[in-house]
Image (cartoon, helix red, strand yellow):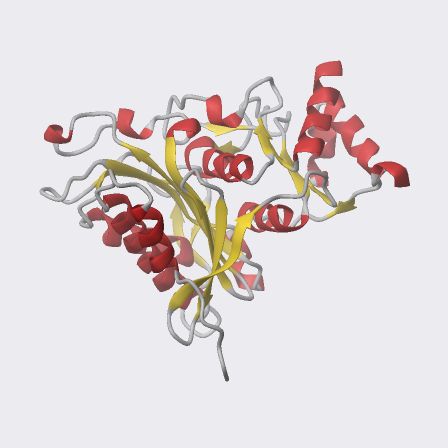
Amino acid sequence: MNRPLGVTVSRYILDNQRLHPEATGELSSLLSELIVAAKTISAEVNMAGLADIIGLSGKVNVQGENVQKMDEFANNTIKKRMASCGYLCAMASEEDEDIIPVVDGYEGKYTLAFDPLDGSSNIDVNVSIGTIFSIHRRRTSLTMGQGAKEDLLQKGSEQVVAGYIIYGSSTMLVFTTGDGVHGFTLDPSVGEFFLSHPNLKIPARAKYFSINEGNSQYWDDSIKRYISYVKEIDEADGRPLSARYIGTLVSDFHRNLITGGIFLYPSDTKDAGKPSGKLRLLYEAAPFAMLIEQAGGRAITGDGRNILDIEPESLHQRVPLIIGSKHDVDTVENFLLEG
């Protein structure tokens, strides 16, 4: 089978580095190490139905969620790979309550926050899942060695890289360094990611809306009115929108990014109330917000804040999230302002 020659992710990273004469190459090397971890996870995910890697591990994480075996594998793979890469001073993971130190003597000038396997509860039914990551420059002095919590607790607007790897019918890496969003698809025959989706732009208007309508009785009236609005017939305005909800954030986000859509996980009154929302700021909302804004969309909380402007107060802080095509996020915001 003839395969077209293309730009590998390694080549893309190096070419991008050359555009910045002041670059030291450390961020490029950090990304390369993370990509190796992603390939390892991808290979294991593709064997999930054949190996003893599906199902529950018997543990509960800091979020109070049952840990899947694949969660544990992905989390350990990233931690082991990155702890001694020499470019990080600290890490944070959805699966770990506290800051994750790096190996002594290998401290660097960046931090990594990640969700090792978003949507892992869907792996038993072969639904796409993914890894989400966010990279910041450390705030404390490099002479301090190990990083501190303050190095991780930074606004999304201060990210230097944000991205995700989606494991589906193909494995795809999507990331931004602040110069647009680019997608790379893994060719398993050669074990390399090739540029397949350069300069991704989300359509200005959505085709789809993504929300868990099973929670509708817990929503604010403004959200209820908006969802009714997008279901109304108005051909001139492109309505009704089609409902698409996978229940794996990375999968819903990826589809909406490519085809145009809006994802909503608003605050609700379920389980004694979630005024702070459900999704985690550091390693879910913030990296997706950077990606969507670089692609021409918007990300807000619905209570008057842009996701990228929020300074985290804790590693696992939760926020409401409304994210996607700009026109549609603007419309939701108008509904919320009307009360």
Residue 47 sits in quarter: bottom left
Q: What is the residue that sits farthest to the bottom in this orientation? A: 1
- Judged left or right of residue 296, residue 82 is left
Figure check: 336 above or below 71: above
How far across and how far down the image is residue 16, in percent? Answer: 35, 48
Return the x and y of residue 191 as percentages of the image width and height. 37, 70
Q: Is residue 146 above or below residue 253?
A: above
- Give the quadrant of the C terminus: top right
Image point 38% across, 43% down: which residue? 114
Residue in the foreground of this view, choosing between 63 and 316: 316
Coordinates of residue 163 in the picture (x, y in percent): 44, 45
Q: Where is residue 6 in the image (x, y as percent from the top left)?
A: 45, 66
Do we see residue 100 in this rendering?
no
Q: Residue at 48%, 27% (x, y): give it.
A: 308
The reply, left or right, for residue 106 in relation to residue 310 is: left
Identify which residue, 92 or 203, lies in the foreground: 203
Image quadrant assignment for residue 122: bottom right
Task: Tell me if I can see residue 304 in this picture.
Answer: yes
Q: Residue at x 43, y 27 (%)?
A: 157
Side of 298 where 216 appears, left or right: right
| 303 to the left or right of 184 | right
